[in-house]
Amino acid sequence: MKTPVTVLGLGAMGTALARAFVAAGHPTTVWNRTPGRSPELEAVRATTAAGAIAAGPLVVVCLLVDDTVRSTLDGLDLTGKTIVNLTNSTPDQARGTAERLTSAGAQYVDGGIMAVPAMIGGPAAFIFYSGAADAFDTHRADLSVLARPEYVGADPGLAALYDIALLSAMYGMFGGAQHALALAASAKVPAGPFTERFLAPWLTAMLTSIPRIARDLDNGPAETAGSNLSMQAAAYENLVTTATAQGIDPLLLTPMGELLDRAVAAGHGSEDLAALVGLLRAG
């Protein structure tokens, strides 16, 4: 018999998680603060969070925010349970939740879902996990029905850190793309052909430079910068000037320009983009 699983929270993501467990043959109990959500799920419905938690050893939590996790779980007897918290949170919130729930008798695993609900159970989804290594190892196969599990360390805050790091990169990329589309639109350039022929291929090609930046951070620069920061800072002014002239707010551009100028002023003008990471850490 497969491990009985409890899912707390039936929003879009919680429903997707519960559906994946049901499809994989796990006896699944669900609970939601508002009764009646996701009626199509073929799962046992608990009327209380405590009753849902009592149904099995593995409890997957996917609630709205950290405060909701606190109000739902604090004060309950969690002795012998493995709590896998997939609620989006900060590293410090994850550590605080780990401390509280461990004190209540649970083994705690935090998680960061790198997928949208429709991707759960599919090959492209993965989930970061951190916290109690033995609990994760015990339930690795159970959690694999949701997405590829990636355990990143015993510190409960690491899964949230990895999650937020990747989301930060995603929003930075989207911000640049949105600025590019606004700039093209200012000249009445159709968005579809511009994106398909130029924007998406350009961004894809630029992504190939990220592993080199990472190697430079880990090992030091391997070679002289091909396009050093002094050159880039001097040219960057044209990006802001053009945006303003075209009636586009440069708010998505100016922080990078300021960082480039700061790098040059600090003596990094002959270096490459990896040098900017150190300035962000020092800041």
Image (cartoon, grey):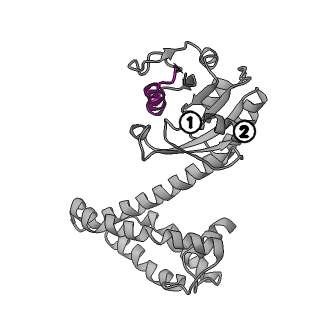
Q: Position of residue 22 (x, y in %)?
A: 46, 24
For the question of whether residue 61 can be seen, the reply is yes
Q: Residue at x 69, y 43 (%)?
A: 156
Q: Quadrant of the C terminus?
A: bottom right
- Looking at the rendered structure, the secondary structure element under dot 1 is helix
Q: Residue at x 64, y 71 (%)?
A: 218
Amino acid identity at mark 2: Gly
Q: Which residue is mark 1?
A: 141
Q: What is the total number of numbered labels drawn onto the structure image?
A: 2
First in sequence, mark 1 or 2: give its number.
2
Residue furthest top in the image: 47
For the question of whether residue 185 can be seen, the reply is no
Please give the range of residues in magenta: 11-27
Q: Say if 191 sits above or below 27 in the image.
A: below
Q: How many residues crowd around disc 2 within 10 Å: few (fewer than 14), some, or many (20 or more)?
A: some
The magenta stretch spans residue 26: yes
Q: Residue at x 52, y 67 (%)?
A: 255
Going by the image, does 280 lie left or right of 192? right
Q: Which residue is mark 2?
A: 96
Instruction: State the residue in front, 263 or 249.
Output: 263
